[in-house]
Image: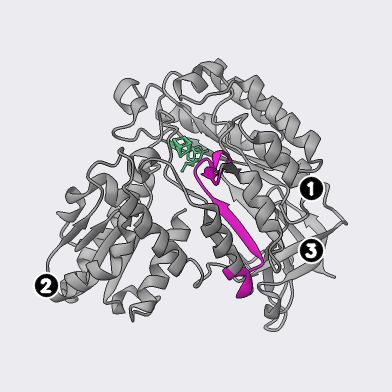
Amino acid sequence: MNKLDTTLVTSALKKAGFSVTANVKEADVVLINTCSVREHAEQRVLSHLGHLKHIKKSRPDMIVGVIGCMAQRLGDKLLEHEAVNIVCGPTQIPQIADLLKQAFEKNEKRLAITEKILQKTSEMQNQALETFESAHGIEDKYIPSQAFVRAMRGCNNFCTYCIVPYVRGPEVCRPPEAIIEQIKRLASIGIKQVTLLGQAVNSYKYKKDGRTWSLADLLDAASDIHGIEWLRFVTSCPSEEFFDEIMQVMADSPKVCKYLHMPAQSGSDKILSAMNRHYSAVSYLELLNRARAAVPRIAIAGDFIVGFPGETEDDFQATVDLLKTARYRNSFIFKYSPRPGTTADKRLQDTVPAEVKQKRIVELLAAQEKISDELSRDFLDKEVKVLVEGLSKKSHRNITGSPDNPQLVGRTATDYIVVFNGPMSLAGRFAKVKIIKTSPLTLFGELI
Ligand code: SAM
Ligand code: SF4
């Protein structure tokens, strides 16, 4: 979601005459796109701002803007920071070029956030976001040949730990014709993989001409677009609604990647209920069974929070059991971080001591690593098709490169990271790789 917003803002500012520099010290404008999901992410932004305050001593004309969720959450408190000139929430990003212009011309601080974030977004705001999205959602792709397309904004689920509904506002599904049109335009400029985005993207629903469009319908329609070869969607919130239809389209369409990211968060029904997640461990695992029955070899990823208020050792062991039964390809595991304003923060005490959270995260990560390692080993000596992203950022041992045969990284349809040597001209294209070595999260191979 944040990467997409960064892409949209970059494209809008380029069209307004700005250009991107990698050197902060020579920038006229520094924009920080922020996340509020965990406290740690916000602390990092504050430390960046401290650094920028220092730079601004010798560059007082530099404009610093904070955009995104933290801007919406902290509003004028953030504007009080000595380094900050602009604070702009996620709903206000269409105004970013104007805000910058005003900041330059009038040398005044500017605040643009939604006052009553929990209220339904106005038609005017929706229209502005829609226009912004279709004008700037086409260029400036983050990775060659790949693009993100928002299916829905906001979230109505109010999981008790989560800040998202308070910073991104209520759920709004984009019209299917706008989404399909955007994907067609992306295909026409050479995009091969599109990822549909939404906080609970599986609950996408849009009523039009007496018919209700679901995510399955969107994937089906997008599968017909010439040039698009892989379609993905994230994130799914466990729910019966449309589940079988979505799995069916994944089974039927060769373009829909056989990958499901569906966070469980916990394996304890008591904790799931305290989190306001509307499923039990058993019903969650039943969904996974149905997914695997409909789509054999589907890769499934999960998210977990350890140390939620009231989580006992037994609750935690139920989470370990669920993770082992689910046999995820990988899991994103977080320590509970109380977020101001959320129901959990207001009503529940952060009872689990830091060292217990730490012990639990280490144990859960180890259990996942073992499963990931076993699943990865299945790929040894097999051929995989990858969409090449570009140069591998990490330099891996045992793979030596040369300037015309550097170390590249790509991903399989099931989201496995594959590292191999090949020409840079492969970036943005599909390649076949034979796997010669595996690790829990990365496969290593040779170009075929
Ligand atoms: N919408 C997605 C969903 O419902 O699964 C995920 C949204 S959230 C940005 C990504 C992940 O962050 C969640 O799945 C959860 O595991 C984690 N998360 C959210 N709030 C958190 C908190 N207060 N403390 C720790 N982790 C949190
Ligand atoms: Fe947060 Fe729950 Fe919405 Fe995901 S579904 S964004 S965890 S409130």
Q: CA distance from mark 3 to mark 1?
A: 29 Å
Task: Give yes or no for residue 386 being in the magenta stretch.
Answer: no
Q: CA distance from mark 1 to mark 2?
A: 57 Å
The amino acid type of the residue labelled 3 equals: Gly
Start-end of magenta stretch: 185-209
The amino acid type of the residue labelled 2 equals: Lys
Q: Earlier in the sequence, mark 1 or mark 2?
A: 2
Marks 1 and 2 close (CB-CB < 8 Å): no
Q: Is residue 22 above or below residue 416?
A: below
Residue at screen point 49% across, 38% down:
334
Q: Nearer the viewer, mark 3 or mark 1?
A: 1
Residue 315, x across and y down, in percent: 55, 18
Q: Is residue 29 visible?
A: yes
Q: Earlier in the sequence, mark 3 or mark 1?
A: 1
Helix, strand or loop under label 2: helix
Answer left or right for 318 relative to 67: right
Task: Give yes or no for residue 202 being in the magenta stretch.
Answer: yes
| Figure quadrant of residue 407 | bottom right
**Which residue has dot 1 on it?**
252
Say which mark, if any, is on residue 375: none
Residue at screen point 77% across, 47% down:
376
**Which residue has dot 3 on it?**
445
The amino acid type of the residue labelled 1 equals: Asp
Residue at screen point 28% across, 59% down:
66
Q: Is residue 328 visible?
A: no
Say which mark, if any, is on residue 106: 2
